[in-house]
Amino acid sequence: MRTTEVSEGIFRLSANVKDILFEGIWPIPNGVAMNSYVVKGKKCAIIDGVCDWDGVPETLFAQLDEMNVKLTDIDYVIVNHMEPDHSGWLRAFKEIRGTFTIYCSEKAKPLLEAFYGIHDDVHVVKSGDTLDLGAGRVLVFQDIPNVHWPETMATYDTLSKTLFPCDAFGSFGSVSDDAPYDDTLTEEQIQFFEREMERYYANIVAAFSHPTKQAIAKLGGIEIKTIAPGHGIVWRKDPGRVIRDYVRLAEYGNGPAKPEVAVIWASMYGMTELGIAPVVEAIEAEGVPTHVYRVPETEMSFVLDAVWKCSGVVLAMPTYEYKIFPPMFAVIDEMFKKRIVRRKAFRFGSYGWSGGAQKELDETMARLRGKWDFIEPVEFKGRPTDADLDLIRERGRELAREVKRWCLAEGGAGSAAE
Ligand SMILES: Cc1cc2nc3c(=O)[nH]c(=O)nc-3n(C[C@H](O)[C@H](O)[C@H](O)COP(=O)(O)O)c2cc1C
Ligand SMILES: [Fe+2]
Ligand SMILES: [Fe+2]
């Protein structure tokens, strides 16, 4: 990787990571960029670190070398966020650098001790505190708790009006050396990162949508010329674009999201599956696009992404040992952990003798207090009859019409932006 200059005196260091499950759970077929920023006044600070996965700290050190920054030149390490994808390199850095001062939030301090045994030279800051690097460069800190951990803060450079928000405004997707900026990317490439951002959001940020909205409101009064996140590309041509993207994504949990339908289905012997093509056809006949994923074949990450951005959901699964087919239950449970609070929904599925999936679904929805508005389900014994399939088609059309109505009536964040 090559170091690039974000603006005068600010440099982006980065390593793309591939072939891992991010957070040990989310696949990243297109990789993810881990970004750090060196900010120079008379003194030098490094904002956000990287993970300690194979070769990554070394990549960072090589990039410092390349820009003629000696590790001993770094006076301050700003730890916006303690998750090890950004702090993991601290141990390796400390071994080489020896003494330096860490700036972090109050809640990060005990985490520095717990994760890395670091307790000396830790300077705790709160919202509004500053660090003067000299040469007119003053950094200001702002707590943005729970975006993504409780200790998270953002750093703002008053000279260049650059915001360093760490996980916020980030995305999946490896970033090419040549084009890490929105002004060096084509519109098509920016849209690639926006798609990667949606899944990143659904997997990593979704559960923290409320704190994310609060953070965006807090930062609203600041003039921002550049957004330099811990993952993904840097936004300096149009930082408003990524802010609008995040505002839109943060609203999706409460719905309506996009006027589209996620069809999430599972089937052991193909009985429930017989209803999938008819329901998809019926929904699309109403002009509503669908995203169809089979469970457990599809990893949770992609299912959550689809359900996060669709206003309508079809859950199609059979009964298994008197309950919901287990991998489908796991997906439903995770949807609620991600706070997918409101949706228009339809469930159908097969059973053998007395069923049970529908009962468990009703109980689960009541327990999780989801405001999912279900149209009447269709359940059938064994193979669906032609009449069952007709009913599934009819309900599919009904769901699609409900989704369209909802998006039209309330579709501010969801449909208007599309
Ligand atoms: C392991 C297993 C457990 C099942 N448990 C139940 C059950 O508790 N109640 C019931 O009515 N049917 C039960 N069934 C029957 C299925 O729900 C039925 O075969 C249904 O048609 C499966 O639909 P599918 O082919 O879409 O998976 C079970 C089937 C299997 C294989
Ligand atoms: Fe994080
Ligand atoms: Fe992160």
Image: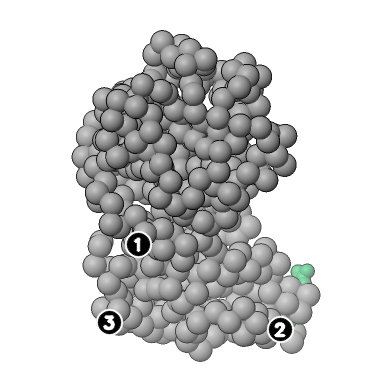
Residue 409: mark in rendering: 3
Residue 131 seen in the figure? yes
Residue occupied by mark 1: 217
Mark 1 or 3: in front is: 1
Q: What residue type is labelled 3?
A: Ala
Residue 67 in the image, given as x and y percentages of width and height: 39, 13
Instruction: Pinpoint residue 77: horizontal percent, then vertical percent.
Output: 51, 31
In this rendering, the label closer to the viewer, 3 or 2: 3
Q: Give the number of marks.
A: 3
Looking at the picture, tell me which residue is in the foreground, 249 or 261.
249
The amino acid type of the residue labelled 2 equals Gly
Left or right of 210 on screen, residue 176: left
Is 363 situated above or below 179?
below
Which residue is disc 2 drawn over?
A: 355
Residue positioned 22% across, 34% down in the render: 183
Indicate if the residue with disc 2 has its beta carbon within 8 Å of ligand 1: yes
Q: Which residue is drawn at 26% across and 46% down?
A: 224
The answer to which of 226 and 221 lies nearer the viewer is: 221
Q: Distance of mark 1 from mark 3, alpha carbons?
A: 25 Å
Identify the element where label 2 is drawn.
loop
Q: Are marks 1 and 2 in contact (CB under 8 Å)?
A: no
In terms of sequence position, does the residue under pointer 1 or pointer 3 come before the other?
1
Residue 6's spot in the image, x, y percent? 30, 29
| Residue in the foreground of this view, choosing between 194 and 298 | 194
Find residue 184 and report its image quarter: top left
* Picture disc at residue 114: none
Asked which secondary structure carries label 1, the reply is helix
The answer to whether 238 appears left or right of 73 in the picture is left
Residue at image point 40% right, 73% down: 255
Q: Where is residue 167 in the image (x, y as percent from the top left)?
A: 47, 46
